[in-house]
Every structure is written in structure tokens, then in C-alpha cells.
Amino acid sequence: MANSNEELSYAAALDTAEQLLGVRLEQFLEPGIGEPANGEDFKRLATVHTFGDAWSRTDILDTRTRALVSVAIAATSGTLEPLRGQLRIALNNGVTAAEIVEVFIHIEAYAGAARAFEGYQIAVQVFEEKAEGEST
């Protein structure tokens, strides 16, 4: 059972995630069928560390820069579903689609064409999603 400070940290991390992503994370954090009880601990720890500890450190790297770094990391590591989220965070925080394309050009040069093209297909889907959302 988490103490009140841990609960406050978790709530703040969820709020930060919503600000960055534009959606609440709770729907993605619900326990799955057969998931052990400590799965909740993993999700809470990962959420607090990522959105409470890392993303909030804007004194040296601002959110926009962190978003570009996160896109590059997710794309080069081949974590495509997290890449989708990182692209949404980037676009929601002032990064342009053209800047994201430049990141993929750089990924292609340093991580290879196959990895860059694979991630870029996710980027195109997120660009379309964003354009459709803006046209409604």
C-alpha cells in the first residue's frame, strides 16, 4: 500500500502524462487478466519515474527538446508503440512534423534505413491522426 507522499507523486505523474499526451493514462494502467498483483507496482513505479521524475526536469532540457530526444530513442530502439506516444507528446508540445522528419533523416544516417523507415511509418500514422483531429 502506498503512503500519502507516494500517492501524491503518482497523481502528479498522471497529471503530467495527461498534459504531455492529451489523454489520461489510467485506462492503460488497469490490471490485465491474469496479471499478478505486483504488476500494479511496476506500472506505478514506471509512471512516477517517467512522468514524475524525468519529464519534469525542464530546467536544463525543456519539454520540447525532451520530446525530440524521446522520439529518437523510441525509434532507434524499435519500440514502435511507445514511439507512437512519444510522437504525440512531441506534436502536443510544439514540435513540428517537419522537425520530426529531420529526426528520422538523422536516425537513418546513424541507426540505419530499415529502423528509420519502420519508425517513420508510425510517424506518418500519427501525422494523419493529428491532421484528422485538427480538421474536426
Image: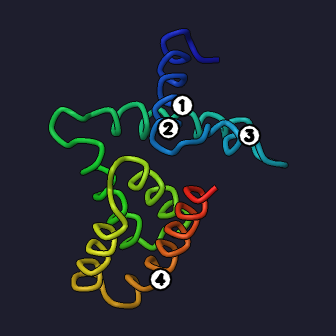
Name the side, left or right, on which 93 lies relative to 30. left
Q: Which mark is residue 17?
A: 2
Residue wearing tag 4: 118
Residue pictured at 27% horizontal, 81% vertical: 105
Q: Would you say the residues marked 1 and 3 are in contact, meaning their CB atoms lie under 8 Å apart?
A: no
Residue wearing tag 3: 30
Q: Would you say the residues marked 2 and 3 are in contact, meaning their CB atoms lie under 8 Å apart?
A: no
Helix, strand or loop at label 1? It is helix
Nearer-the-camera pick, 87 or 54 = 87
Choose top left, top right, bottom left or bottom right for residue 90: bottom left
Q: CA distance from mark 1 to mark 3?
A: 13 Å
Q: Amino acid at mark 4?
A: Glu
Q: CA distance from mark 4 to mark 1?
A: 29 Å
Q: CA distance from mark 2 to mark 1?
A: 5 Å
Q: Position of residue 101 (x, y in %)?
A: 33, 75
Please tell me how crowded label 3 is: few (under 14), some (14-19), or many (20+) other residues with Cα within 10 Å.
few
Please tell me how crowded label 2 is: few (under 14), some (14-19), or many (20+) other residues with Cα within 10 Å.
many
Which is closer to the viewer, label 3 or label 4? Answer: 4
First reached walking from the N terminus: tag 1 or tag 3 = 1
Q: CA distance from mark 2 to mark 3?
A: 16 Å
Residue 53, above or below 39 = above
Please state, as top left, top right, bottom left or bottom right, where the C terminus lies in the image: bottom right
Q: Amino acid at mark 2?
A: Ala
Q: Which mark is residue 14?
A: 1
Nearer-the-camera pick, 96 or 90 = 96
Q: Position of residue 39 (x, y in %)?
A: 67, 41
Q: Amino acid at mark 3?
A: Glu
Tell which residue pokes out farthest to the right in this image: 33
